[in-house]
Amino acid sequence: TSAPGSLAGRIRPGVTYPGVATAYDVGNGNGACSYGPTSDVMTAAMNTADYETSKACGAFVAVHAGGKSITVRITNECPAPCQPGQLDLSQQAFAKLAPLSAGRIQITWNLLSPATGDTISIRYKTGSTQYWCGIQAIGHRNPLARLEVRSGGSWIRLARTDYNYFLSEHGTGCGGAIRLTDIYGERLTVDGISVRPDAVQPTRVQFARH
């Protein structure tokens, strides 16, 4: 493992960030992170700067305002005019901190590594084959820093898109072993995930709590 949080991007563990919270209608729960529809309404959109080409996707964040605290999961991006530090909360999440009529409130927020009984799942993108594929990890406790595939005896790091899939443009490693690394440097290796586009395939692994 690496030094604690050394693989983190702009959002670092152990740091409290000042900002503002606004609210939006999350609809069916889908967003820029491409997780798909969800009944979980305790979610938020991260401003573009801190979204950082989807590095924030799946992160759990504690939000504090006026002596109240909530936990949300990042599932979407809030583009300009959202500013660095700003969170666009689901209306349901915002309402736990202040009346929706407030519109905009001052907050602080910080990264969490929550307790969970869930394990990580893997999904291949629509159109994936052995010749081209996009791979997504879902349900990780800590923010994901890297996704690599095994090819020719080596691990190949895939590029991350702003819609939260890691692409293998020429099919390298598609359908083979996958290695996930969180921002704390923990590595998890997953085998036996076949190329089945749009299928959410469970694993038996989860990152450690911090």
Image (spheres, rainbow, N blue to C red):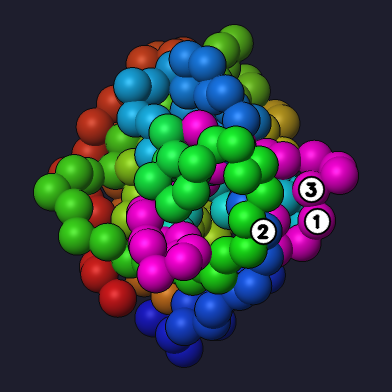
Task: State the residue at coordinates (29%, 26%).
Answer: 201
Q: Secondary structure at mark 2?
A: strand
Answer left or right for 100 relative to 72: right
CB atoms of marks 3 and 2 within 8 Å: no
Q: Is residue 73 magenta?
A: yes
Q: Nearer the viewer, residue 137 or 60?
A: 60
**Residue 37 has which mark?**
none
Coordinates of residue 171 in the picture (x, y in percent): 62, 29
Distance CA(mark 3)–CA(mark 2) = 9 Å
Q: Kindly identify which residue carries mark 2.
A: 20
Q: Kindly identify which residue carries mark 1.
A: 83
Q: Kindly identify which residue carries mark 3.
A: 82
Distance CA(mark 1)–CA(mark 2) = 9 Å
Coordinates of residue 80 in the picture (x, y in percent): 86, 43
Q: Secondary structure at mark 1?
A: loop
Quadrant (top left, top right, bottom left, bottom right) of the N terminus: bottom left
Q: Nearer the viewer, residue 166 or 138?
A: 138
Q: Is residue 144 visible in the rendered structure shown here?
A: yes
CB atoms of marks 1 and 2 within 8 Å: yes
Q: Which residues are magenta?
A: 62-91
**Neighbour class for label 2 at 10 Å: few (<14), some, many (≥20)?**
some
Q: Nearer the viewer, mark 1 or mark 2?
A: 2
**Neighbour class for label 3 at 10 Å: few (<14), some, many (≥20)?**
some
Residue furthest out toward the left: 117
CB atoms of marks 3 and 1 within 8 Å: yes
Q: Nearer the viewer, residue 61 or 173?
A: 61
Task: State the residue at coordinates (63%, 63%).
Answer: 106
Q: Is residue 204 above or below residue 18?
A: above
